[in-house]
Image: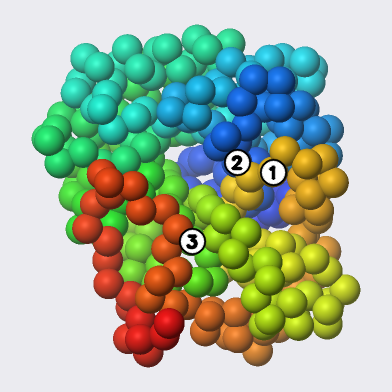
Amino acid sequence: MGLSFQPLDALPVIRAHGARIPAIGLGTWRSTHEEGVQAVRAALEAGYRHIDTAARYENEQAVGQALAASGLPRDEVFVTTKVWHTELRAADFRRAAEASVARLGLDHVDLLLVHWPNPEVPLEETIGALCEAQRSGLTRHIGVSNFPVALLDRAVALASVPLAANQCEYHPYLDQTLVLDACRRHGMALIAHTPLGSGKLLADPVIAEIAREHGRKPAQIILRWLMQQPGVAAIPKSSNPVRIGENLAVSDFELDASSMARIGALARADGRVSQPAWHPRWDAAANSSAADKT
């Protein structure tokens, strides 16, 4: 099955290889302990049906507590978790995935991702373990995270089960045209982490002007820009109930082509936020004029 974008009630959904991924989800990085529980509960009460976590975030148990307390049927919430880059050997991968599912208090997740690639572990072994996790019932769907185009192409070629998503940093300051094109070519969703650029975009004058024109918050403009691109979902992080609600309220307005283009033109060479020591070699900016901006 390829890629499509359809509304599910009021929440748009990305369909990718059988996965139905709500286009707006809650990111939970750094939301730990009771703060994590309360953030997820606030999100579910506001209407979110997509929650993103990871073993590395050390909050899977908190997320699980909030899911259990919500009383929502299991099949109504799309839950993503990830296996850390030090756990990508086959035996380690299986143990890590089982531990994540157990900490969440679930019998499976909806999407299991390789959190970061690791050049010290053969990709064949990692992707084989990822596919085995799906076949064994630990997850309904599988994918990768922070994979540039060449690695993504290799992962797709190695996978015996279709990869549903590549979760990558994506926002108006970061040109991800090449990765987005690759995801579409493979029928995959691109799930945008750090979609607000860790807050850097919220004071941008172009974003602020468009927000005033629409009577919206800057974050809503950015999230709408992402959501209007076919095959793109976003997982903004917040622990503030008001902002959590605002971030979800982006389905009742549209940006015109001019606004979309103005926001897309904000891409800059120094726009990337996530640059850990273990990051892979990123793709060059597709638009050379954007790469020349400072």
Residue identified by numbered label 1? 238
Which badge, 2 or 1, is on the more N-terminal residue?
2
Between 13 and 269, the one lying in front of the other is: 269
Q: Position of residue 273 (x, y in %)?
A: 45, 58
Residue identified by numbered label 3? 170
Q: Which residue occupies 38% across, 19% down?
A: 97
**Few, some or many C-alpha atoms within 10 Å of disc 2 (few <14, some 14-19, many ≥20)?**
many
Q: Along the horizontal axis of the image, is 60 left or right of 274?
A: right
Which badge, 1 or 3, is on the more N-terminal residue?
3
Does any portion of residue 184 appear in the rendered image?
A: no
Cα gap from disc 2 to disc 1, whole angstroms: 7 Å
Residue identified by numbered label 2? 27
Cα gap from disc 3 to disc 2, whole angstroms: 14 Å
Note whether 136 is above or below 208 in the view shown.
Answer: above
Q: Which residue occupies 20% across, 20% down?
A: 90
The amino acid type of the residue labelled 3 equals: Tyr
Q: Nearer the viewer, mark 2 or mark 1?
A: 1
Note whether 146 is above or below 121 in the view shown.
Answer: below
Mark 2 lies on a secondary structure that is strand
Asked whether the beta carbons under mark 2 and mark 1 sit within 8 Å of each other, the answer is yes
Note whether 223 is above or below 42 in the view shown.
Answer: below
In what quadrant of the picture does the C terminus appear? bottom left
Cα gap from disc 1 to disc 3, whole angstroms: 17 Å
The amino acid type of the residue labelled 1 equals: Ser
Q: Position of residue 249 (x, y in %)?
A: 80, 55
Q: Along the horizontal axis of the image, is 26 left or right of 188?
A: right
Q: Position of residue 266 (x, y in %)?
A: 53, 80
Note whether 135 is above or below 163 in the view shown.
Answer: above
Does any portion of residue 103 appear in the rendered image?
A: yes
Asked whether the beta carbons under mark 1 and mark 3 sit within 8 Å of each other, the answer is no
Q: Which residue occupies 62% across, 32% down?
A: 31
Which badge, 3 or 2, is on the more N-terminal residue?
2
